Amino acid sequence: MTLEEIQSIESYCSENGITIKQRLHELNISESNFYYARRALTARQSTSEGSFIQLGSASGLTFPEPVRSASSSRKGKNVPVESYMTLELRTESGTAMRIQGNFTSEHLGIIMSSLR
């Protein structure tokens, strides 16, 4: 399987609210072949210096609705500030991850706590 095929399956599952297992059954692809190919591609990508693999949105991280404006406080209430950031992480085993988007300090806390 190619990286594009894997991403297509993960994207389809995310968009249609079905599990990867269900989609693989529909496509008549064995789960072991899918996960073996995904693991092999991930390992190959993470060993290339500076390369990252795009993961599907099935990562399990969910965020509250983003705050669009935070230029001032309203009647003494603090409005969370949202900033566009790129986070690049590498595990001890060498797996690399890049996360980009508009984040508040609450979002960063969720990401960091999920890494423990």
Image (cartoon, helix red, strand yellow):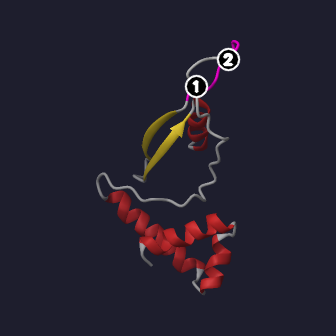
On-image quarter of the N terminus:
bottom left
For the residue pair 93 and 86, the one nearer the viewer reads as 86
Image height of 71 relative to 75, above or below: below
Give the alpha-carbon distance from disc 2 to disc 1, as whole Å. 9 Å
Picture coordinates of residue 86 (x, y %)? 43, 41
Left or right relative to 53: residue 116: right
For the residue pair 80 and 92, the one nearer the viewer reads as 80
What residue is shown at x 55% (from left), y 22% (from top)?
71
Image height of 5 relative to 115, above or below: below
Picture coordinates of residue 85 (x, y %)? 45, 37
Which residue is disc 2 drawn over?
Answer: 74
Picture coordinates of residue 98 (x, y %)? 43, 48
Dominant secondary structure of the residues highlighted in magenta in the image: loop
What residue is shown at x 56% (from left), y 27% (from top)?
81
Which residue is disc 1 drawn over?
Answer: 70
Which portion, as a residue range, is magenta? 74-81
For the residue pair 99 and 116, the one nearer the viewer reads as 99
Quick check: is 22 in the magenta stretch? Answer: no
Left or right relative to 28: residue 38: left
Amino acid carrying label 1: it is: Ala
For the residue pair 17 and 89, the one nearer the viewer reads as 17
What residue is shown at x 58% (from left), y 25% (from top)?
70
